[in-house]
Amino acid sequence: MKIGYPCVNQSLDCTSSRTFRLASYSEERLIDIVEQNLACLHRILEYNVQHGLFFFRLSSDLVPFASHEVNQYNWQEHFKMTFRRLGNYIRNNNMRISMHPDQFVVLNSPNEQTVKNSVAELVYQGSILDLMGLDSTAKLQIHGGGAYGDKPAAIQRFAEVYHTQLPEAVKVRLCVENDDRTYSLQDCLQLHEETGMPIIFDNFHHECINNGEPMREAVQMAASTWHSERDGILMMDYSSQAPNERKGKHVQSIQEQLFHDFLTETEGLDMDIMLEIKDKEESALKAIELARSLGRVLV
């Protein structure tokens, strides 16, 4: 088991998500910002290795406006060696990497432009992982999208876009995640049947919307969609409900007893856990110690 957190390290004095306004776009500014983002990313990866956190989600903003038509610069060639060095560091330290495109990526949208933009964003993010030389166990995770008043039709529209508009380099990395409002685990299983995509399981979303599956059974169902040679072991997102907040709001800091209970309930099941908890690496450090105490990660 690997444990990690997404995108931002709050212990360091840098960010890998720097961007700028579209109105001020220039190639010089792009190059400068990407250099800073990738330098910070290397520092974050070093921090994670030093602290036993071997799962990390890259920021979607490593290359600002990468999927926007304004960006015609060949940043892939410019930063080729930097990406390769980052990938070498990741592989040499047996880290696992993922990316999670923003909510505007909706493959089953009835709006053709939205779909076109979504495909372009997935191609960009997949190319980051390709440039790093990471294998297909490094994943892109998205949600099912909208139901648009007819979920079966929306699922079929997703499958059609998947099969006809996504390049193989994206399809081999793409996963679908159960969400907290529309697409339950069962809906994602249907998408898996239509496309072959593995399911990234989110325990908190499953608590928000489900079809009565107990947690351990739900984890096993999601894990069954992963093919170890191509996909690696199950990736999942972990969080819990923030007290006295709207349903679905993520907790500020890990609730250690709840995480202990989850690890106990899933004993014997292999997975890599991304903590979607607001204090980032602070909770991840607590989680890794808990997991060690239960023998779920190597000391």
Image: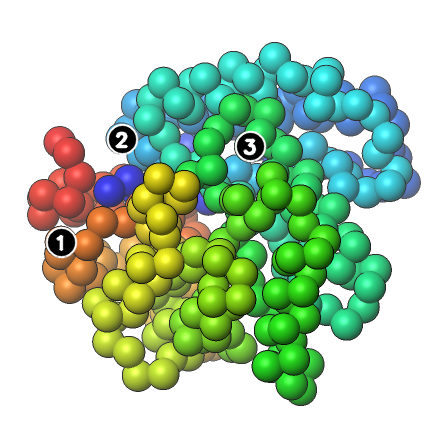
- SS of the residue under disc 1: loop
Residue 78: x percent and y percent? 73, 16
Q: Earlier in the sequence, mark 1 or mark 2?
A: 2
Query: What quarter of the picture does the N terminus occupy?
Result: top left
Residue 77: x percent and y percent? 72, 18
- SS of the residue under disc 2: loop
Q: Is residue 98 visible?
A: yes
Q: Which residue is mark 2?
A: 52
Residue found at x 15% / y 64%: 265
Q: CA distance from mark 3 to mark 2?
A: 22 Å
Image height of 266 relative to 1, above or below: below
Name the image quarter holding residue 204: bottom left
Q: Is residue 42 visible?
A: no
Residue found at x 53% / y 50%: 174
Query: What quarter of the picture does the C terminus occupy?
Result: top left
Q: Which residue is mark 1?
A: 268
Three-letter code for the amino acid on which mark 3 is drawn: Leu
Image height of 223 relative to 66, above or below: below
Which disc, if any, is residue 129?
3
Crowd rating for badge 2 (residues with CA inside 10 Å; few <14, some 14–19, many 20+): some
Residue 194 is left or right of residue 286, and the answer is: right
Q: Nearer the viewer, residue 22 or 110?
A: 110
Three-letter code for the amino acid on which mark 1 is drawn: Gly
Which label lies toward us, 3 or 2? 3
Residue found at x 14% / y 41%: 292
Q: Nearer the viewer, residue 169 or 11?
A: 169
Residue 190 is left or right of residue 157, and the answer is: left
Residue 162: x percent and y percent? 64, 58
Name the image quarter holding residue 84: top right
Which residue is most to the bottom?
149
